[in-house]
Image (cartoon, helix red, strand yellow):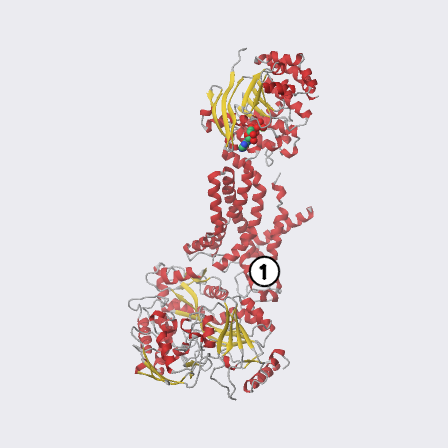
Amino acid sequence: MRNHRLALLAASFLLAALPATAQSGAELRFVLRSEPKTFDPMLVDDEASETIRYLTGGVLIRVNRKTQALEPELGVSWKVSEGGKKISFRVREGLSFSDGTPFTAEDVAFTMQKLMDPELHSPTGDSFRSSQGQVRVTAPDPRNVVIEFPSAVAGLERLFDQVAIVSSHSPKKEAAVLGPFAIAEYKPGSYVLLRRNSYYWKKDAQGRKLPYLDSIRLDVQQNRDLELLRFKRGEIQLINSLDASYFESLAKEAPAAVRDIGPSLDSEQIWFNQVPSSPIPNYKKKWFRSTSFRLAISEAINRGDLCRVVFSGHARPAVGPVSPANLFWFNKSLEPNPYDPQSALRRLQQDGFRFDGHVLNDPDGHSVEFSVVTNAGNKYREQMAAMIQQDLEQIGVRLNIVTLDFPSLIERISRTFDYELCLLGLVNVDLDPSAQMSVWLSSSSNHQWNPEQKTPATSWEAEIDRLMQAQASTNDQKQRKSYFDQVQKIVWDQQPFIYLVNKNALVAISPALANTSPVVLRPQTFWNIESLYLSNQGRGGDQ
Amino acid sequence: MTRTTSLLSLCLSADYPDRPNVLRTLALEMYSGEILGLIGQSGSGKSTLALAILRLLHLHKGNQRGEIWFQGRNLMGVSEREMRSVRGRELGLVLQSPLSALNPALRIGTQLEEAWRAHVKGSDDAARKAILETLLSVSLPAERSFLRRYSSQLSVGQAQRVIIAMAILHRPSLLIADEPTSALDTITQSEILRLFAQLSRELRMGILYISHDLLSVAALCHRIAILHAGQILECAPPAQIFGAPQHVYTQKLVAALPRGALLDSDGDKVSSVVASHEVEESVKPSVESSIPDQIPSIVR
Amino acid sequence: MKLLRRTAAAFLIAVFIAALFAGVLVPVPYAKQFRDSPNAMPSRIHLLGTDELGRDLFSRLLYGSRISLLLAPAASLLATIIAALVGGVAGYAGGWLERIALGGTDLAMSLPWLFLLLAARAVLPLNLSPAASLLITFALLGFFGWAASARVICAGARGLRDSDFVLQAKACGCSSRRVLLQQVLPNLRPALFAQFLISIPVFILTEANLGILGLGVSEPLPSWGGLLRGLENWSAVQANPARLAPLLLLLVVVSCFQLVLRQEDFAP
Ligand SMILES: Nc1ncnc2c1ncn2[C@@H]1O[C@H](COP(=O)(O)OP(=O)(O)O)[C@@H](O)[C@H]1O
Ligand SMILES: [Mg+2]
């Protein structure tokens, strides 16, 4: 333990020091878990492509993955006006793309125009589209650019974190980049080699040109077991997200390499089917639409045990739709639902349910039995379901576990509505609540427990609708936060989603890699790629 | 009853898909109680004829046309259902290789029972009784322990007797034996030949005895038919076949026989067979007297 | 050799009895989660240790044996009977029947059966008791698992079709149906028996794989298949080698089956 701390101390010392021990010609290696679908930054829609875009693209504004605050990059300064409809940037001067083509405001204008072209069907562009209408982009001079949207875009500035600027007149088109690395080689199905961009503009405190690394080799490798094996062999230096069981197995062999960074943005939750037209018995619909029934079920689940047993402690009981890892937006006044089967039973008994020590019966004499569906093959969900099964047995509720292949599951929860309880996870990439708009609006098809409502079925859903619209229509962050805090409170009171756990972000980093500072936001380990370097010492382990 | 009655009268053509005209309007007539020897080289169509009479040629993918008059009806005209009731009950068949004709997975008793039950619905006792009786008549031990054996536990001679027992279980009026002895050693061969003579005598059934060996059938048969290239060249009592063959082919066949054997069979024993072939009643003593000493002499 | 057979038989009987009386023998209920000791090592209380959720592996193994030892042979029997009928009829009758049947087995073997199973699960009601899901799972296995065996049987029956004893039986006036049932099928007994034996472990493993598709025996019931899935967690196996017990038991039981029920006994 003491040794461990010493090593940490040494690491923090290195962090401050010059990378004197950096290997020259150092190459960082890690894997892409799927083939990148595109190298065009505007068309990115998958994780592998996003990784390449993050490593090669230059953006106007960067979300600092550690502080979660906005930082100027290519945009030296900016100003949002007209209630979030208009943004004007002043861009950095004297920069060049990786092929030497100079960078000006004209490139920004070109990028935005192309991005917002409806013909392109850019997923990144879609997040800017709040309503129909033309986006107007003007670059009055080489240093300034003004972008006007037809209506207000909530959380406008942080969307620019995804917009890699492309050159308006470089012959290499989008292969000319402004980020720290540029694609040097690509062998489909095998690897992508990135080489440092010698035109990259950032320098470290000592005036050295960044990035320190010479190249990054990204091997396409789907198999997680092989990824782990290669890490153990020292062939790769990073694993960006580890499963709890892999984490535990690696922790035994190389405790210095694994890091649990605490709760991530991702959550696991269950929800009851509240669709009025669903093909389930009416008496069950009555249970599922009762707030106190949902609360009772929520209280009967031992979240602490789920974290401890299923995730070997690498998870935290979840509170609601926002993880505590989301520093700004999380409603700090809320707590996870406590495990309290007695309180659950009291609630149910108040509603006329009867518990004979064995079976729970509803007021009409139906024994309480329902099924939970989840996707087959996910070990953690299957285990959570088995634990919830036992938890609910204590209050006389019989839970049947049904694991389905993903297409059948989606068919059931979004088309036929032939299910009772569903266990799934939610992957949150974005910190901003506007990204969750489609989940909360009662008219939306992603409003899982009762989608596409003509008018809100309940008053609390109507209230959520109102608050979500309100937060979207202002650019005052404080105001938005207060609206979204209320949404979180309503969800906590009503439990349409019963949140179970937030999984911890688990990563593996080779001790040879210096200056690392893993965070919960993607890309967890290499968000500060330009200041990472490989040291000889760390690898030798003689420290 | 001295009048000869026709048992079988046929005129058949048969083809195989890749081999037409194996039988070419072959005509043949048999009388009740008669032993007719059918002689032909291998490949001449003997087995084809045997199967065709039972209308089983389709099992070998063959096709047959013509008429088969048997006990007053044309078998070519009856339904498969009726035909099935004729097979085994009125027409028996004994195949060449006794070991392959017995089912290796079944006990002897089971197979005999199957053959019995194909035509008789009745108690197990009745079946058992009929089977044991038939075993006796083919000189096999009529014991339960024997019935429990598998074919692999039998000698070839015993196996052939089992097959014969199976074929005569229902006392058919015509038994077709397709080279029943060619897979047997000489001693067993003569025993089986004697058995046929005895059966014909005791049960008075007609036997179509198929063989490629002219000599071996000479003493047994009342008449001999010579089959060549799908046609009957001539059909006559042995004395005539051996003494005055009409057809060139028959002459060659006889000429090719070993000298001594021919001389031997030229004696009065052959003629006694020849003399007595006509009538059922008279078959009995003559065959009885001829076979025992006749066969060894042929074998020699 | 005889001793070996006896030992195998005794072992099988012991396993069957242990599985039958699992309720009496097991120290703790198979579904009880000892949440304070997940992944425990073997001990006095947990003879084989516990699984990820702290459930006693010994209890689960015994109950799982009960399920798998009873149902996998039953499914295998069902599959073998179907294979015998389809393959036997097709091979014996030949001609278009054989072509249709072989086409059918090709179809059954090539693509749709996984999807059929999925579709079957999709149309089943959600609130099935674990026991019902179990029966359905193995019935489906039996129903869909016959094709490969049917091909083998068909080939065997085709060989017998032209045999002399079939001809002899027909000449005795036996009907086609009786010839098939009484003459042909008994000769296929060794092949059928082999198919039956081969199918048992295959079905046990298929059940395990079905679990991945959401069709296996549902929680909290244990089965050998479910227990074998536990071996996926290799680090847990390394930590507690007793977790290999289900695999060992499967191997030993299957080989005991083969020792006790030898093929020769089914051929004369
Ligand atoms: N199943 C068959 N398919 C085609 N040709 C056959 C078949 N069986 C026999 N043959 C042919 O028909 C002819 C007569 O055969 P067969 O009746 O078996 O002769 P035998 O019994 O006199 O030796 C032979 O030339 C043989 O090659
Ligand atoms: Mg022949």
Left of A272 or right of it: where is B132? right
Q: Quadrant of the N terminus of chain A?
A: bottom right
Horizontal and vertical percent for residue B248? Answer: 59, 18
Outermost front residue: A171
Left of A539 or right of it: where is B64? left
Q: Can residue C27 be spotted in the picture?
A: no
Nearest the camera: B80 or B243?
Answer: B243
- Residue type for callout 1: Phe
Left of B248 or right of it: where is A290? left
Horizontal and vertical percent for residue B120? Answer: 51, 27
Q: Secondary structure at mark 1?
A: helix
Q: Quadrant of the C terminus of chain A?
A: bottom right
Residue highlighted by disc 1:
C58
10 Å neighbourhood of mark 1: few (<14), some, or many (≥20)? many
Nearest the camera: A360 or A223?
Answer: A223
Nearest the camera: A456 or C179?
Answer: C179
Q: Residue at x 58, y 81 (%)?
A: A24
Label 1 lies in ligand 1 vicinity (Cβ under 8 Å): no
Total count of labels: 1
Nearest the camera: B62 or C69?
Answer: B62
Q: Can residue C112 be spotted in the picture?
A: yes
In the depicted structure, whether residue B156 falls above or below residue C143: above
Horizontal and vertical percent for residue B266? Answer: 66, 14
Outermost bottom residue: A206
Callout 1: chain: C
Q: Residue at x 61, y 72 (%)?
A: A253
Q: Residue at x 68, y 18 (%)?
A: B261
Horizontal and vertical percent for residue A166? Answer: 41, 77
